[in-house]
Amino acid sequence: GDAVLPGGVSAEALAASADVDLKVPAAFARSSSYMEHPIFNTNHSETEMMRYLNRLSSKDLGLQTAMIPLGSCTMKLNAASEMIPVTWPTVGKLHPFAPVEQVQGYMQMMHEMIDDLADITGFHTVSLQPNAGSQGEYLGLKVIAAYHKDNGEEHRNVCIIPVSAHGTNPASAVMAGMRVVTVKCDEKGNIDFEDLKAKVEKHSENLSALMITYPSTHGVFEANVKEVCQLIHDHGGQVYMDGANMNAQVGLCSPGGIGADVCHLNLHKTFAIPHGGGGPGMGPIGVAKQLAPYLPNHINAPTSGGTKPVRAITAAPFSSGSILPISYMYIRMMGSDGLKKATEVSILNANYMAQRLRGHYNILYTGETGFVAHEFILDLREFKKHGVTEEDVAKRLQDFNLHAPTMSWPVVGTLMVEPTESESMEECDRLVDALVKIREEIQEIIDGKVDPENNVLKNAPHTADTVLADDWDRPYSREKAAYPLKYLVDNKFWPSVGRLDNVYGDRNPVCSCPPLEAYEE
């Protein structure tokens, strides 16, 4: 039948009234077949489609099954109440270049959001333009460069970055036209202050900025962070704070209060927008008063930036504006007390888990008082001499219905755990109990009680096909493979595939589409 447009008018009828010919010229008409994959011709009803989507979901170990404790990712709850406005046509169907007079509700929300984020961060104002944290870094450094140029110090182009920084930090600095100088970390994971002083003094005349993360990428509140900021300011530089770990600051301290001059915020982390799989994200930056004049405007929002704006860095004036209501709802519903409580619980959860795991694993970095921030690093490198790697532990966690923490970052051979405030004590205990059980399985290898190459760790994860097969030739029981703890009997997630050779897979991609022969003419 005719394609029907909003309002009930068919495309053909509309074309006829406007005297438009919808016929495709023969030269451009498709002659080959298309959409022949079975998926396009299998599900013909909503019921079938629902079941297909459920089958896909059942293959994925997501938040519907367990916590996702990825360190430095802040995989917190994306509450349905925050997400509802995104489904409204007045929110999700507006064009980013719609005339301002037609989007007054949006403008009010964004102005309120700017005020809220400025209050939370302790900054003078905020730009909503960056689409991601990496773009926020780039824009923040461009703003710093513009500030120096306006002060007659365009030669200031050295950006000092700790070796523990996120990989996007040096990339953003180079893209912003700066020279990167690295500073070492001490044995506790903190910035080596003596090395920093030496680098700052050496590059004092050309110092543009320092990029730091607080709490540090190692999951520690660095006690001398204000002293670090003051050192940079004393030598004419500006401090860029990476907001990746802002979930440990909100309501307790702020980048502006610490002494930073600019900081990006991952709204898709700290402020509850869903993330993963490439986006969408938002990485607004907050700036101190002296940097505010250089915030970018946009051809479709000429008054949105400062008085001496840098060029726009995104196509849309306010980033992925249609998802901004998620963070707006999160902040408004939580309120000041709720945001502070969330931060406190995220830190409490991490320290509770770290404390329970002490004695089983080495907690790589802690602060001066022995505590961690909102995440912590489990050091598994001591087990490598016994043939056990961090990948073995990560794969084995699937047999416990659990998602692995961040693997081999920021330190190779480790797992970094971030439970967030969204997880209950029971869920935190479930991950800890699994890790303790895995530590017992590691000890069996160390003590020579099991084959070092043929054991539950090396063969993990165990799929249903493997466990239910007629032939079982492994030197441990099926129960130990699939049900290492009792709770799994009542609720078992079955991994779809067993252990893969990751390196081989990366080097030899295989398409799951129809074979190439199907595309031959």
Image (cartoon, rainbow, N blue to C red):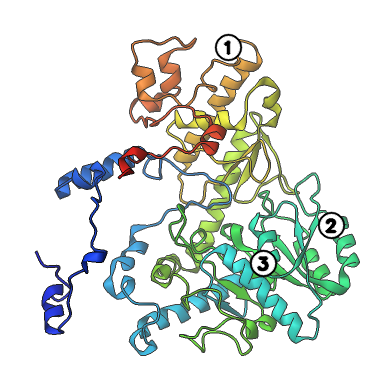
Seen in the picture, residue 438 relative to 41 is either above or below; the reply is above
For marks 2 and 3, give the one nearer the viewer.
Answer: 3
Residue at the disc numbered 3: 175
Sequence-wise first label, 1 or 3: 3
Q: Is residue 377 visible?
A: yes
On the rendered image, what quadrant is the C terminus found in?
Answer: top left
Residue drawn at point x = 12 percent, y = 83 percent: 17
x, y (%) of residue 104? 37, 85
Residue at the disc numbered 1: 450
Which is more toward the observer, 514 or 235? Answer: 514
- Would you call the spot at circle 3 few (<14 residues within 10 Å), some (14-19), or many (20 or more)? few
Kind of residue indicated by mark 2: Phe
For marks 2 and 1, give the one nearer the viewer.
Answer: 1
Kind of residue indicated by mark 1: Val
For the image, the number of numbered tags is: 3
Secondary structure found at label 2: helix
Between the residue at mark 2 and the residue at mark 1, the CA separation in whole angstroms equals: 47 Å
Q: Which mark is residue 396?
A: none
Q: In which quadrant of the rendered view does residue 228 lie?
A: bottom right
x, y (%) of residue 186? 81, 48
Sequence-wise first label, 2 or 3: 3
Q: Is residue 345 left or right of residue 378?
A: left
Kind of residue indicated by mark 3: Met
Secondary structure found at label 3: helix
Between the residue at mark 2 and the residue at mark 3, the CA separation in whole angstroms equals: 27 Å
On the rendered image, what quadrant is the N terminus found in?
Answer: bottom left
Residue drawn at point x = 82 percent, y = 53 percent: 192
Residue at the disc numbered 2: 193
Q: Are marks 1 and 3 in contact (CB under 8 Å)?
A: no
Q: In which quadrant of the rendered view does residue 289 lie?
A: bottom right
